[in-house]
Image: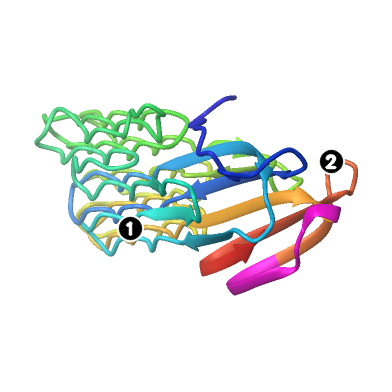
């Protein structure tokens, strides 16, 4: 899937002999809503592969935080010498908030929030709501791979799924939307990729979005916050400079071919090429 592909010009001003860096930039998810409200939208995501990265450039990773209840998620970004800043937009706040992915609709509102359609696309819209009784189901938050489910007159909508990426060497979903709430005692599912599940809008407790997945928070009487984002860089082991700062996990010998280094920034940091 060529989701969110964008040419950034890493290595601008360099010549042949530079190396390739693959990256993923996931923003923080939006917080879910209280009562019969929509699930939070997942943070937006951008991915790409850039060639001819030359030595000495400093790439800065900013990792967005998840939004508190009924609060938009925070943007994530990558910036560096000679390139334009790349920014993934934080997830929409419940209910019907716009963002990287849109939040689900409150039970009294027909349409969910809008996801960032780009170009390049970062995410999808939140689900609409069932605006009549008896259960007044609210919409699920949008995910990075699909729209959140609509609520119905009998149940809330599930959150939209996040995309699957194998940048770390194994398939992982990022950016699942939060589940919407309703008057029923049942629960709604968060989208694959850290989306928080929703619950009863009059007595239930929802789940928060997953940490470093950018998932949206679920909706309930006690709603869930959005999950924090993540920035990931990947390059051949032999190209890795060894110079980083900040909060980063460094894994060498990763797939394919057990030949790649993966830098996973779970908070702000830098990598010098």
| x then y, percent, for residue 152 | 24, 28
Dot 2 falls on a residue whose secondary structure is loop
**For the magenta stretch, what is the residue range?**
238-249
Nearest the camera: 153 or 18? 18
- Is residue 243 on the magenta stretch? yes
Dot 1 falls on a residue whose secondary structure is loop
189 to 56, vertically: above or below:
above
| x then y, percent, for residue 168 | 71, 49
Q: Is residue 200 visible?
A: yes
In what quadrant of the picture does the N terminus appear?
A: top right
Residue that appears at 28% across and 64% down: 68
Residue that appears at 22% across and 52% down: 201
113 to 13, vertically: above or below:
above
Q: Is residue 4 left or right of residue 135?
A: right
Q: Is residue 32 left or right of residue 188?
A: left
Q: Is residue 86 left or right of residue 128?
A: right
Residue indicated by mark 1? 74
Q: Is residue 211 visible?
A: no
In what quadrant of the picture does the C terminus appear?
A: bottom right
Residue that appears at 40% across and 29% down: 121
Nearest the camera: 223 or 209? 209
In three-dimensional space, the C-alpha distance between marks 1 and 2, rounded to whole angstroms, equals 32 Å
| Label located before the other in sequence (1 or 2) | 1
Nearest the camera: 81 or 26? 81
The tag on residue 146 is none
- Is residue 182 on the magenta stretch? no
| x then y, percent, for residue 156 | 29, 38
- Answer with the quarter of the image where residue 158 lies: top left
Q: Is residue 219 left or right of residue 76?
A: left
| x then y, percent, for residue 55 | 69, 56
Residue indicated by mark 2? 256
Nearest the camera: 1 or 139? 1
């Amino acid at each position: 899937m060529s989701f969110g592909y964008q040419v950034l010009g890493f290595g601008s001003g360099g010549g042949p002999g530079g190396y390739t860096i693959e990256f993923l930039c996931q923003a923080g998810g939006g917080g879910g809503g209280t009562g019969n409200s929509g699930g939070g939208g997942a943070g937006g995501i951008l991915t790409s592969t850039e060639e001819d990265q030359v030595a000495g450039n400093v790439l800065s990773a900013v990792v967005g935080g998840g939004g508190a209840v009924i609060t938009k998620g925070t943007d994530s970004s990558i910036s560096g010498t000679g390139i334009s800043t790349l920014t993934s937009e934080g997830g929409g706040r419940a209910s019907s908030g716009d963002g990287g992915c849109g939040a689900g609709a409150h039970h009294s509102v027909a349409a969910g929030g809008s996801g960032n359609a780009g170009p390049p696309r970062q995410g999808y819209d939140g689900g609409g709501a069932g605006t009549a009784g008896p259960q007044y189901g609210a919409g699920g938050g949008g995910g990075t791979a699909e729209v959140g489910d609509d609520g119905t007159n009998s149940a809330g909508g599930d959150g939209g799924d996040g995309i699957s990426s194998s940048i770390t060497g194994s398939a992982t979903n990022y950016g699942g939307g939060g589940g919407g709430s309703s008057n029923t005692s049942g629960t709604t599912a968060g989208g694959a990729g850290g989306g928080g599940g929703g619950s009863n809008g009059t007595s239930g407790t929802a789940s928060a979005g997953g940490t470093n997945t950018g998932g949206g928070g679920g909706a309930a009487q006690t709603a869930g916050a959005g999950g924090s984002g993540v920035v990931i860089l990947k390059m051949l082991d032999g190209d890795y400079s060894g110079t980083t700062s900040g909060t980063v996990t460094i894994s060498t010998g990763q797939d394919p071919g057990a030949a790649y280094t993966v830098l996973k920034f779970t908070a702000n940091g830098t990598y010098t090429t």
